[in-house]
Amino acid sequence: MKQTDLANTLQSKLAPACQRKLKSKLRDKYQKINIGISGYGNSALLNEIYTELYITEGGGGDVNQEHEVKQIEAASRKRQTQERPIKCNDIFKPSPEQNQPIRTVLTKGVAGIGKTVSVQKFILDWAEEKVNQDVLFIFPLPFRELNLMKEKKLSLVNLLQSLFPETQDLKPRHYKNYKIIFIFDGLDECRLPLDFKNNENLVDIEEQTSVDVLLTNLIKGNLLPSALLWITSRPAAVSQIPPECVDQVTEVRGFSDPQKQEYFSKRIQNQELANKVFTHIRSSRSLYIMCHIPVFCWITATVLERMLSEAESGEIPKTLTQMFTHFLIFQIKHKSQKYSGKSDPDPQQIREGILALGKLAFQQLEKGNLIFYEEDLRESGINIRDVSVYSGVCTQIFREEHELHLGKVFSFVHLSVQEFLAALYAFLNRQIPKEQSTEQQTSKFFKLFSMSTMTGFLSSAVDRALQSESGHLDLYLRFLLGLSLESNQTLLRDLLTPAKRISHSNKETIKYIKKKIEENSSPEKSINLFHCLNELNDHSLVQEVQKYLGGGADRRLHQASLSPAQWSALAFVLVNSEEELDEFDLSKYHPSEECLLRLLPVVRISRRVVLASCNLGVKKCKNLGSIINLENSSLKEVDLSNNDLQDSGVELLSSGLKSSHCKLQILRLSGCMITENGCSSLASALILNPSHLKELDLTYNHPGESGVKLLSARLEDPHCKLETLRVEHGGKIRIKPGFKKWFCDFTLDPNTAHPRLSLSEENRRVECRWGGKLQSYPDHPERFDGYQQVLSRERVTGRCYWEAEWSGGGGADVALSYKTINRKGRGSDCRFGLNMNSWSLICSDNRYSVLHNNNSTALPPPPSGCRRVGVYVDCPAGTLSFYSVSTDTPSHTLTHLHTFYTTFTQPLYAGIWVYYGSSVTLCETE
């Protein structure tokens, strides 16, 4: 054999040999997982305890700055049928709709949801040769490990050989000729600049540079363009990767409802006890939602398994603060019994350890850090030599990782644990004399600690949380308020200095929170304030609105005069209900902007939202635009018809419509005063986000020829999903405000007029005189001969509005009638309002009432001298509304009197009934 052939043969065997070594190493590393995510806890085989997580296509890689608890709450509402699930091992496989290969996948998910475990399972399945055997090498490169190399200069080959010695013998061409996957876990933990804009381009895998430059060039595809990349991140950090560098975004949703029950059945061997635990969790909405997170399931199981067994007694935790307090106590006792053989550990040692960890949690929460390095611990006053002491205090709360190649990394078991300890530190620190306080005056929170009273301290914490746009202090605030309860302080008695324990009434704090709910313009922040009231065991506001719910709720709510705080309480109740809200119709509550503002959280979780004819203006479009582009919004259909949004409102709405997060399929904007400028905004949004909207209703607007052309182009665009565009019934009259856009110039039909009625003013006026002569009308089969009634000549179709003004001492009826109403005789089948074929508003100086099918409803009379009535009919929607019209103002203020809801089945006509000595005039459009 020639020397060249021999070399080639050896090289061809080299890569598989290195692969076998790497698989063996990764198999040993990932086949076991620590229960409780603890470096000191018991371990189990990953394949035995792994529960498949729910992974979906995750939309865009836009940043989501909401608190992750809010994201979990929103995700828990999403129907799984709305999304395409993806198996973990198939993330690089394109869907049938994707026509190009996937190089880079970005997987996002909140802290503790299972991203890292999914990565471990993916690697283990490959190492055990179950899947993805076309891949020669998988290189896991967690960001927390790469952070420790940020000062080094090395090539990509050097980097891989230093972290994976099994690849020492590989040549550069092996990396280029074979299928390789790089896995970058924990983008949110990255402390490298990732300067995609300014970093130099690099194509040589043997050229030395910084780790940051290596990463940006790998992600951009300059280095090893044939390699596949998988990046995981919490939602708040995904924007660090340019969208053009990502081919697919997926999202880990954690446990579905059935998977929660499956977890507790696996975790707790006693199935009767497991069922008791799960039943208790189901009874608390906040606990049940948090159990979407696997780590929280473990925390809950740890606490409830012990408390619901015969070994423990006391109140079973129902709030988050109670749950985490019991978890902390359990960990302290567990450590003491395991290592010291004592049931009562040294209080002073515990207090010092918890304060040290709490300070670290507090300071790093300010910075937004979830992982810490040795310099972070030193900054918080923790001696590196004493780390084992601190982690030993609560072995499964604070963890120290030893497996990294270049140094140590520390973290709390979950972000919520860090937030709890930060709140506990703040609360404990508040009770320490100022001269002994460990909190530095440079802290942003120093003013909070210096408050003279506990009420002032807690009120300041509420204010600070409300000022946070992202809501990153929401859970911290809930914990802090919960810890102020005497019952929770009793549980933590060993951590509280007896001499400094403060007897505190929460009445003033509760009052302050309710005041903030009343004042607060942010509906989402109000929802968290209700969670805070729950932690304080106050449910009074919620109880106030409970009486409006249940059977007949629509009518009670429509007639109710709720305060802003009560509307917010109603939103809290609806959002936390287990019932799916398929449709939210504002008219069933109170058709006003104030009501909508308070109920926006309900809009977010509904599939179909009806806001038609609710007097909404431009300002609310901004709120709606922000909701429809939320990543976890359930909205598929929005009806904003008959609101004077105008082009400026549509522009604000379009800002949400163009977002890749917006999944809206049907948008109804009929009668919203939209011109070609508004159409241009909508067309631009459909160009940027063409993948979802299928139906757009712009009837009764004034799009003009150019507006119709712009939107029609989207119908013809093969990339745009728009299928139905409606632009009928347009014209300049449609840009008039209010009901004027529907104004119809009706005239009265002489062939239907009763002989005692006299028509004039081109058949717009009708009069019934006392003792007047009968009119010499010819006989006609459509003439009323028993009652002084007359119908319009023109038919009522689509949406119509008209006004009628009456005069004289008798009064009049303004009616809507089917053409089939009987005309002959004085039976109930002939009189407006006494039958199924007609609806009537009865007007006189001292009383108003509505009448249909002989059922009368009395109405408050309008102000003295107000004798003009407005009538609005929406035939397709089946609504008939009566209004009193004040002519004292130029805008002619309308006051709603009554609305009939029905289904119109026959041709409709306007009708007038005139009392003796009175007249009625049909008003002309202005």
Image (cartoon, helix red, strand yellow):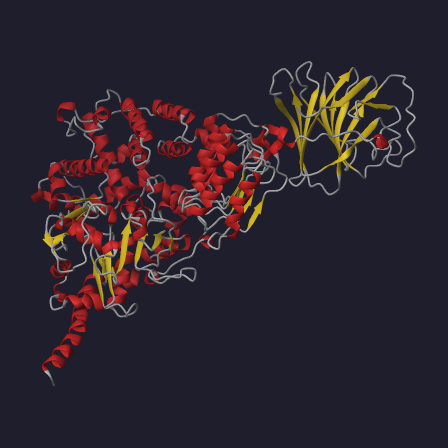
Percent across and percent down for residue 445 are: 22, 28
Front residue of this view, candidates 410 and 617: 617
Q: In this rendering, would 362 be left or right of 467?
A: left
Q: How many marks?
A: 0
**Residue 21 in view:** yes
Check the picture and name the quadrant holding the N terminus: bottom left
Percent across and percent down for residue 479 are: 30, 35
Check the picture and name the quadrant holding the C terminus: top right
Percent across and percent down for residue 404 are: 14, 54
Residue shown at 19% from the left, 58% from the top: 203
Front residue of this view, candidates 919 and 880: 919
**Residue 543 in view:** no
Q: In this rendering, would 922 be left or right of 494?
A: right
Compared with 214, 789 (above or below) is above
Residue ranking furthest to the front: 706
Q: In this rendering, would 326 be left or right of 82?
A: left
Front residue of this view, candidates 713 and 435: 713
Percent across and percent down for residue 854 are: 77, 32
Q: In this rendering, would 366 be left or right of 925?
A: left
Residue ranking furthest to the bottom: 1
- Residue 659, quarter of the rendered image: top left
